[in-house]
Image (cartoon, grey):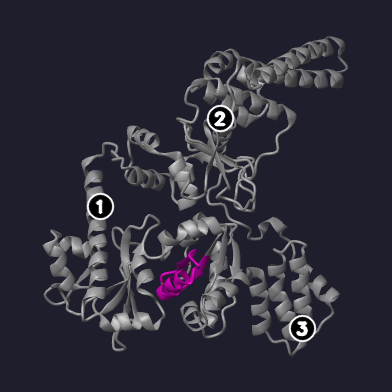
Amino acid sequence: MTRYTDDSLEKVRDAVEMVDLVGTRTELRRAGVNRYEGLCPFHDERTPSFGIDPVKKVYYCFGCGEGGDAFDFVRMTEGLDFKGALEYLADRYGVRLEPVEEDPATAARRQERERLLELLERTATFYVRYLWDSGEAAPAREYLASRGLDEGVLREFRVGYAPSAYDTLLRAVRRGGFSNREVFDAGLAVRSKGEGMLYDRFRRRIMFPLCDLRGRVLGFGARALGADQKPKYLNSSDNAVYHKGRHLFGADIARAAATKAGSVIVAEGYTDVIAMHQAGLRNTVGLMGTALTEEQVGELSRLAPRVQLALDADGAGQDAMLRAARVAAGRRLELRVVPLPAGADPADLVAAEGARAMQRLVDTSVPFVRFRVERELSTGDLASAEGKDAVIGALRPVFAQIPPSALREELVALVADRTDLAPAMVGSWLAQGAGRPAAASPRAAVPRTSGAPGERAASGAARPRALDAAARAERDFLVQCVAAPNTAAAELTALDIEATFTDELMRRAAAHIRDHPDAPTEDVARDDSLSRLIAELSVRAAPERGSASAFRGARLNLELAAIRREKAAARAAGRPLAPIIARERSLKDEWDRAIDQELAESQPTT
């Protein structure tokens, strides 16, 4: 994997315009000299609690606790890892990334991969042009129109057509300077058994580019146009850049909508996904003809915390949903099922009943556990006592994962009604298997995780940590340190940080600010908890004046918190309190004077 120099990273950081970047996701308005605010793009709110510091290039939401720098913002909104976010920002702001010096073998592999990616990109363009400009592709255009798909959305997904001749693509890419070996390695050509002659892998097929989250073409899915062609669907074979089952169709186009909606819809076929996007359901991705894999679940969890399965309602589609739940187990994804009518797929429904009908079905998606219960009831033998016992036995592990809730009571009532048994009795039988704690049930996933306290809650967004009085005093002092870096450098160097700060995260932040007083947002390790706190401190500090009186007040408040801890310890040990109380009173008087001075200095002059 390509690594880039630290200098490249800093060039990207310097080039980022934070108001421009964040403004693509939420409307911002100026709220101070170094502060803009708007509605948080990571959770629903009506009153703005989301702010950015355009100078330090950080953001923080006081409502959900999400915060960080430009790289974190892109990771969250675009569903990318750090390297992907770096490359995304470099592309956006025109920065050339310099790779770390590589050994010759590594450099050669990287260059080969870049050549294959360029070849695949050009091939996708070739197929698109052939679909819309050639007479041969007229039947393909007619087929796509018959599915109710408009040219605009087909072009957005770069749908194309592979001509029927055995070497049309080969000749075209050779003219572009690519070798036979590169065409073969990219999975675009195969060899005949006899003479080993190369010929196009895809012929007389509608072509769907298969892309990664950054939109780079890795391979193709191809649908046969004629009934005589076998197989009906043909994908690129595994090669240096394409690996079956690692990606989701349309994820590069759907990721922004999925992040905003907090949910991602999963369909099966290529045309299903495109039809859903055309219907306004822009957070839809596809399985690309594979059973859901671990890698795809990982990609889904990076897109959104809620997954709505819009798979065909036939037996195969229902089996696919059960497999999806097994693969997603442990990822803490919230799985829901979109109730599609039997025998209909999303593309058919959109074409026949319109976008609103499809939207209503998505809006009425049910928790996956309800789907499991209803499936067991519909397939089980409810005519005999033995059959009812078998159904209840099969449902015990399902109910073991449902905590006490209205949903659980509804499902118990449903089982009782369908089995014609008393609800209380059914409830007791189903509870016999409830040996696992409720926390084991699939809940909202977190696009990025770390075990630090105060990280993401089940909603999928970070939740602000609940701070005690001491930690609040420590945080307020650090805010003043960020606001007044010249004063902070000397104060933090003189402080015994280990003894002064009771909160481990505040302690780490204090040490970082001590070492980076003029640029606290720089050189923060890719540590979600620390980078989020540094971002919060920076956003809080933006409206501060950095005055000596405000800094003095925060410093005294920190000392008061330490005095209160000392007083509590003395009381518990039975030691005299009088001298401690006297020092506390003296500090409190000094703190009051500092606050009065700060209030007086902050009043506007007339």
The image quadrant of residue 576 is top right
Dot placed on the residue nearer the N-terminal end, 1 or 3: 1
The image quadrant of residue 236 is bottom left
Q: Between label 1 and label 2, give the one nearer the viewer.
A: 2
Report, in whole angstroms, how far the alpha carbon at label 1 lies from the one at label 2. 43 Å
Say whether marks 2 and 3 touch (CB < 8 Å).
Answer: no
Q: Is residue 470 magenta?
A: no
Residue 55, compared with residue 135, is above or below; it is above
**Residue carrying label 1:** 114
Q: Nearer the viewer, residue 269 or 397?
A: 269
Q: Nearer the viewer, residue 563 or 318?
A: 563
Q: Is residue 349 left or right of residue 571?
A: left
Report, in whole angstroms, how far the alpha carbon at label 1 lies from the one at label 3. 61 Å
Residue type at mark 1: give it: Glu
Q: Which residue is pictured at 52% across the width and 74% down the height?
A: 320
Q: Which residue is pictured at 64% across the width and 84% down the height?
A: 379
Say whether marks 1 and 3 touch (CB < 8 Å).
Answer: no
Q: Which residue is pictured at 71% across the width and 18% down the height?
A: 595
Residue type at mark 2: give it: Ala
Q: Nearer the viewer, residue 220 or 323?
A: 220
Q: Which residues are magenta?
A: 265-288
**Residue carrying label 3:** 419
User: Which label sits on residue 542?
Assistant: 2
Q: Is residue 44 left or right of residue 205?
A: right
Q: Is residue 268 magenta?
A: yes
Q: Is residue 228 left or right of residue 168?
A: right
Q: How far across and down, in percent of the image, does residue 154 sit?
A: 36, 71
